[in-house]
């Protein structure tokens, strides 16, 4: 991780992907996106990795988005 790189909350990541924050937590648990734990045990995500995943057009991510939207 770069020094000073912005870390995003599950809610911020969820907003970018238009999914529920619990979906982001499931992605992290499944290893689809790495997370960092704060001293309090909360997950945080590297902005650069989130942006790369968003730009990748990962079909699994798109499927999750459609399911979350009820399509």
Image (spheres, rainbow, N blue to C red):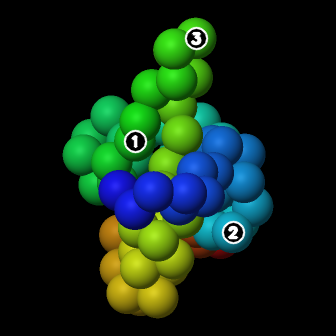
Q: Tell me if I can see residue 66 in this picture.
A: yes
How packed mark 3 is, by other alpha carbons closer than 10 Å (few <14, some 14-19, many 20 or more), is: few
Q: Which-is-in-front pick, marks 3 and 1? A: 3
Q: Tell me if I can see residue 63 in this picture.
A: no
Q: Quadrant of the C terminus?
A: bottom right
Q: Quadrant of the N terminus?
A: bottom left
What separation in Å lies between label 2 and label 1 (alpha carbons)? 16 Å
Instruction: Specify the label residue 64 is tagged with.
Output: none
Q: Which-is-in-front pick, marks 2 and 3? A: 3
Residue visible at 58% across and 11% down? 40
Q: Position of residue 39 (x, y in %)?
A: 51, 14
Of callouts 3 and 1, which one flags the residue occurring earlier in the amino acid sequence? 1
Of callouts 2 and 1, which one flags the residue occurring earlier in the amino acid sequence? 2
Q: Which-is-in-front pick, marks 2 and 1? A: 1
Q: Which residue is mark 3?
A: 40
Q: Residue furthest front?
A: 3
How packed mark 1 is, by other alpha carbons closer than 10 Å (few <14, some 14-19, many 20 or more), is: many
Secondary-structure class at tag 3: loop
15 w.r.t. 61: above or below: above
Secondary-structure class at tag 1: loop
Of callouts 2 and 3, which one flags the residue occurring earlier in the amino acid sequence? 2
What separation in Å lies between label 3 and label 1 (alpha carbons)? 14 Å
Residue visible at 58% across and 51% down? 7
Q: Quadrant of residue 67?
A: bottom right
Secondary-structure class at tag 2: helix
Residue visible at 72% across and 45% down? 11
45 w.r.t. 61: above or below: above
Q: Quadrant of residue 61?
A: bottom left
Q: Which residue is mark 1?
A: 35
Q: Which residue is mark 2?
A: 16
């Amino acid at each position: 991780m770069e020094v000073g790189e912005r870390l995003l909350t599950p809610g911020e990541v969820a907003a970018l992907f238009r999914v529920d924050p619990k979906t982001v937590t499931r992605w992290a648990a499944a290893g689809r996106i790495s997370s960092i734990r704060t001293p309090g045990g909360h997950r945080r995500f590297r902005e650069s990795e989130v942006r790369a995943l968003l730009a990748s057009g990962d079909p699994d991510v798109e499927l999750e988005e459609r399911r979350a939207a009820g399509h």
